[in-house]
Image: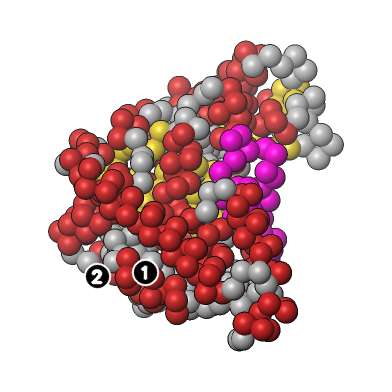
Amino acid sequence: MVDIDPWSSDVSTDYDRIIQKFGLDSVSLSDIPNPSLHHRRDIIFAHRDLGNILQAHSQGDPFGVMTGLMPSGQMHLGHKMVIDQVRWFQEQGADVTIAVADLEANATRGFSLSECRKVAMEEYIANYVAMGLDPARTNIYFQSMRPIVQRMGFTLGKRTNLSEFEAIYGFQGDTNLAHVQAPLVQAGDILHPQLDEYGGLRPIVVPVGVDQDPHLRLCRGLAGKTNWFNVNDRKNGGIRITVSVMDENQNIVAGDKATTHSVFTKIVDVLKALGYGDIVADANHGIVDLPAATPKDRYPIRMSLLALERSMGGSGLLQPSSTYHRFAVGMTGGKMSSSMPETTIFLTEDLKVMEKKFKRSFSGGQSTVEEHRRIGGNPDVDVAFQYLKFFFEEDDVVLEEIRKGYVSGDILSGELKMMTVEKAAAWLTDLAEMRDQNAHLVAEFLADDSR
Ligand code: TRP
């Protein structure tokens, strides 16, 4: 058994253990410019290399956000959470790339490509448009129609093997090979925006739930293994750069002594151009040290060396950044899953049905009014409260008032549910209106290769 299976609806919510086990970094709110509701409420709780994105942002350098969808069902609140994050990154200046994972849905859910297209257009993209993504800076494509992502999946496959797939995904002898290819194509999805034809070298962030982290681990590993130049922290401070010699570059970076030396000269020139004075190059041992460099220098150094790699014929791929959000509790108190409609609200949900779902939803209140007034409710497990927190109440002050009122017993469970129903109804109504109003924009969101 692997710890996280991205295709299972069972997800671990032991977030601290996940951070520990998979080496995620915690998000610190003070580092985030214009923090969103998800940041302020600790819903986005961890990341990998978000510093790259923040540094690019603060320097006014380009950066992108990437996500993908399997067009295999109805969009629900869990999807809204991802799109809200994508829109937030877009508002901070990111360009947006979205993969319609029709190949993956075909491989893992048995959907035909034409079914995928229909669902993607009518269900997913229509809602993206309604949720306010900017068509001018949003690029949506179909995996099956963008050969480069498949080609990258194929060539990156060289950097992994079946044992790694077994370890990461729990694949076994009977796993079908389309299912094996899906994560490789997804690595193509995540890495291809850095190619010159798709915007060029820049950090790309992928906001996900922890269930998708296996894909990011794989993808970061694949990208890292293609890199010609490694940038690492030195044991005693500073940064060390080493050269990876591999099939693709052995004649360019190794070969004879003169070649090796010219490569080191190039590295040193790149570092000088970045302003470093204290550079210790040891071509014989294949090492360049920057004793005075700090961790913050890693990003600009890496970017410059990736550019150097590209100028020498390499692919120069930066490992993707990622952020991780907590999952909202399902409406019945367990997990939220599209295959169990009673556990979530669909973005096209009928208002009456939505209301019914909240009325039946798991409550943190007491069983009688008297008891509730005396003991108060528990907002941490109360679906109505959690949905205000995760989705519907933008205002932190109002949310806190509601929380206090519920804890003290002033607000009854039924009252809290009605507050949430009202907020949800307003949101769903607004979204439906936006879908109608902006239906003509759906085609504009599609990239040229996917129209
Ligand atoms: N695997 C994702 C899912 O199950 C879909 C996906 C495909 C994706 N390509 C991606 C997600 C790239 C993020 C980035 O929904």
Q: Identify the element where label 2 is drawn.
A: loop
- In the image, which residues are magenta? 16-43
Residue 217 percent across, percent down from the top left: 54, 54
User: 375 or 58: nearer the eye?
Assistant: 375
Q: Report whether 315 appears left or right of 365.
A: left
Q: As displayed, is residue 306 above or below residue 405? A: above
Crowdedness near tag 2: few (<14), some (14–19) or many (≥20) residues, C-alpha within 10 Å: few
Q: Which mark is residue 114?
A: none
Q: As displayed, is residue 119 above or below residue 27? A: below
Q: Identify the element where label 1 is drawn.
A: helix
Residue 220 percent across, percent down from the top left: 52, 48
User: 440 or 172: nearer the eye?
Assistant: 440
Of the residues shown, which amino acid type is indicated by label 2? Gly
Q: Residue furthest right?
A: 236
Q: Is mark 2 within 8 Å of ligand 1?
A: no
User: 137 or 229: nearer the eye?
Assistant: 137
Q: Which mark is residue 354?
A: 1
Q: Quadrant of the C terminus?
A: top left
Q: Which mark is residue 110?
A: 2
Residue 259 location, quadrant = top right
Q: Residue at x 60, y 26 (%)?
A: 58
Residue 133 percent across, percent down from the top left: 36, 40
Q: As displayed, is residue 166 above or below residue 281? A: below
Residue 51 location, quadrant = top right
Q: Residue at x 43, y 41 (%)?
A: 87
Measure the alpha-carbon separation of dots 1 and 2: 29 Å
Residue 352 in magenta?
no
Q: Quadrant of the N terminus?
A: bottom right
Q: Report whether 23 appears left or right of 37.
A: right
